[in-house]
Structure formats: structure tokens, C-alpha cells
Amino acid sequence: MADNERVTPTSDPIQTLADSVRCPCLSGEVYGECCGPFHRGQAHAPTAERLMRSRYSAFAVGDAGYLLDTWHPRTRPGDLELDPALRWFRLDILGRTGGGVLDSEGTVEFEAHYRTRPATPDVSSTTGTQHENSRFTRLDGRWFYVDAV
């Protein structure tokens, strides 16, 4: 597979968002003007942070195909199964280095907050946070997630 070849999604997103709702990445934009075009393959993220935000939104809607498609071919897993019991509800960008429109590499440090959906009504949900400093690289003009540093 060529480094920039599109991966065929293995499944549809778990949740479909209307273009008029607030984007899950909390950029302040609506989904149709923020991460939606990236998820639909109509555009590519212009910066590492925008790619990171769109990947967070893909986790929030359960779009494993987009996550695989934006994962660098050297580090991309063969498949990806998302946990439907996790509800991602907040993204905090803590810092970034490089990753701009003229850069070829960058990192984005973030905290992603989630809540578990209880399996039964008598079990309460729990909350958690994933803290990561993600590394990104640009290949043929397109940003890809590489790994956590």
C-alpha cells in the first residue's frame, strides 16, 4: 500500500452528526464547518492540531475508518475496534510544537475526557481522562498521526 493511499473504512460511524450541531472537538464551530468535511473525505486537515481535533471527533462519533485513514502507514494497526461504552465529551489542547501549514512535523499535547456508559441501569458511569502528546507528520501534503511521544 502506498504511504498516502486511502484506507477503506471497515464500518460506518456509530453516531451520525448533523452539520448544524456543535463539533465534538469544541472548536466553537459547527460540525459541518469543522470536522465533518474531514470525516466525509471532502477535505484534509491543514494543520496537525486540526487533524488531532478531527481524530478526537472521530472517536466521539465512533468513526474507526477515519482514524485508520489518518494514521501513518508505518504505525497504523491492521484494524481498530472502538469501545461503544465510552462517551468522549471534552477535549483540552495543552500545547503544540510545529504542525503548522508550512511544517512537516508537529506534536499536539491534549487531554481527552470520557465517561463510560453503564452496562446496566444499576451501575453508575465513571469518568476518565486520556493525556497524550501525539506526534504528526505530513506526507505528500497531508497530515497523519504517527504515535504518542
Image (cartoon, rainbow, N blue to C red):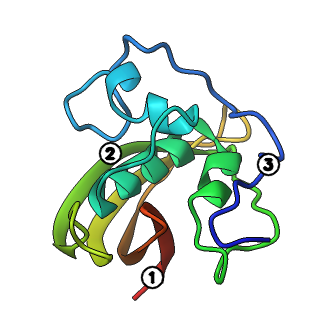
- For the point 32% across and 76% down, the residue is 104
Vertical order, 138 against 41 (above or below): below
Kind of residue at disc 3? Thr
| Residue count near mark 3 (Cα–Cα under 10 Å), binned few <14, some 14–19, many ≥20 | few
Q: Which residue is label 1 attached to?
A: 148
1 or 3: mark nearer the eye: 3
Q: Is mark 1 on a helix, strand or loop?
A: strand
| Residue count near mark 1 (Cα–Cα under 10 Å), binned few <14, some 14–19, many ≥20 | few
Q: Could you give the CA–CA distance between mark 2 and mark 1, rounded to whole angstroms? A: 19 Å
Image label count: 3
Vertical order, 58 against 75 (above or below): above
Residue 135 can be seen, yes or no: yes
Q: Where is residue 63 in the image (x, y as percent from the top left)?
A: 64, 42
Q: CB of mark 1 within 8 Å of CB of mark 3?
A: no
- For the point 22% across and 37% down, the residue is 27
| Residue count near mark 2 (Cα–Cα under 10 Å), binned few <14, some 14–19, many ≥20 | some
Horizontal relation, residue 108 to residue 32: left or right: left
Image quadrant in which the N terminus is located: bottom right
Q: Quadrant of residue 130?
A: bottom left
Q: Which label sits on residue 8?
A: 3
| Earlier-in-chain disc, 2 versus 1 | 2
Q: Which label sits on residue 90?
A: 2
Q: Which label sits on residue 38?
A: none
Horizontal relation, residue 133 to residue 43: left or right: left
Residue 125 can be seen, yes or no: no
